[in-house]
Amino acid sequence: MIYVIVGNLVMIVFSKLKHILLLSIPIIGGMMSQNILNLVDTLMIGQLGHMALAGTGVGAFLFFVSFSGFTGIASGVQTMVARYVGQSQKDLISMALLLGIILSFIGSIIVLIGQWLWLDNLIGLFSSEKEVLIVAEDYYRFRLLGLPFLTFCLVIRGFWNGLSDPKRYLAVIVLIHSLNVIFNYCFIFGKFGFPAMQAAGAGLASTLSLIIGAMIYGFDCRAYLKVCLLLNLSKDILKKALKWLLNLGIPTSIQQFFFALGVAVFYWLLGQLGTVEMAIGNVLVNIVLVGILPGVGLAMATMTLVSQSLGEKKLVDMFYWPFYVSLLAVFGIGAMVLVALIFPTIVLRPFILDDSVLQRAILPLRLDAIGVFFEVLALIFMHALNGIDRTRFVMVVSIVCQWLFLLPVAYCLAVVLGYGLEGAWLSWLFFQVIQLLVFFVTWFRLRRQFFT
């Protein structure tokens, strides 16, 4: 009986495969491009030593916290656009995009100015090593200048995802990341007549590539970026749309901000273990993104499929989308996880030159790889819930699991009980399992609403 059920499920998934892949592959391509950039970035900086790795890791996590809150606006734009498409209200698509850009631009400028004034104090929270602090400050000052341009790119990405046309921005993402790699080589090592800025050059390279990318995106979307379109809509429509965007975006922004802040606290925890542990943590995060970022692409595709099906009132299809996508993730992400589990030394060798440091990273890498598998599945069901406007529930679950379970347990295991990196990553693994169980059970319980 079980074989029959599984066989039927597989046949259904293959019948949906084309639809899922057409939407998810360009998103995954963009995510993988980002991951390749992160790996190359880490590889180049790794040539400068573990102090440089630790310092840029601090700056990278701070930047992650800085832009994390704006992902909620991009996610809200994606949900709104997908719903308008499902409802055949295409005249409101531009409105969602423009509102998202305005909100993200104003917010990013405020964050940039606030952090610039308090930069020394922020960086000082993560390490007492003078060399690490100098590297982190030099890197992050340049990186922070790119924040408004990154938020603009995020909203554009959400817009095209909502239109089920992610390939529209894929080429630009690849160009941005390719330029970033070239700029990295020029500014980190001082090639082709450029100054050798070391870690600071990596921050400058990222900002320059984002500026160029934002300009290209703006030109490509110029037909939708006419402010006069807003003037032709009634105040009631604008007010309703703005309220909907805020209801979608604020909970997701809060969730992503606290998640990113939790990651920063997790990185601070590694700093309590030592500079070598911080460097290993930076390497591990960038390596496992090979699995996480394609998973994020699948999750974003799930959100679009769910939201469009809701707009079309195809509730049965809406319910099954995260299950179809999860089955694809099991095979795709599972294969990458197996590589990290079986060949950890080969995976780590390009990034860590010191043999003693490499050996310390093997078990945490394996734990992190297993955690990626559960994290991707959790992301798929989390984005499915976001697609039906359950953003507040997702926010509460994510914050509670992370701040009341992960961080206290990780601190206890890693620092108090002395299990170090292994204890920290074991806590991360259990955190992902708990999230997956909560989101999966919640989605499954909603089936009665979908089938009535």
Image: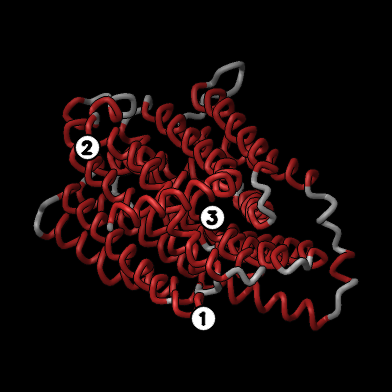
Q: Residues within 10 Å of mark 1 (few under 14, many from 20)?
A: few
Mark closest to the chain's N terminus, 3 or 2 = 3
The residue that label 2 is drawn on is 361
Q: Nearer the viewer, residue 399 or 162?
A: 162
Q: Is residue 6 above or below residue 206?
A: below
Mark closest to the chain's N terminus, 1 or 3 = 3
Residue type at tag 2: Ala
- How many numbered tags mark residues here? 3
The residue that label 3 is drawn on is 300
Residue 168, label in figure: none
List x then y, in percent, for residue 23.
60, 48
Q: Nearer the viewer, residue 101 or 264?
A: 101
Q: Secondary structure at mark 1?
A: loop
Identify which residue is drawn at 34% across, 53% down.
Answer: 6
| Foreground label between 3 and 2 | 3
Identify which residue is drawn at 53% across, 63% down.
Answer: 69
| Foreground label between 1 and 2 | 1
Label 1 vs label 2: CA separation?
A: 51 Å
Q: Quadrant of residue 305?
A: bottom right
Identify which residue is drawn at 23% across, 51% down.
Answer: 425
Residue at the far bottom in the pictured view: 236
Q: Residues within 10 Å of mark 3 (few under 14, many from 20)?
A: many
Q: Nearer the viewer, residue 385 or 40?
A: 385
Q: Secondary structure at mark 2?
A: helix
List x then y, in percent, for residue 352.
28, 28
Residue type at tag 3: Met
The residue that label 1 is drawn on is 452
Residue type at tag 1: Thr
Q: Residues within 10 Å of mark 2 (few under 14, many from 20)?
A: many
Can residue 352 be seen here? The reply is no
| Foreground label between 1 and 3 | 1
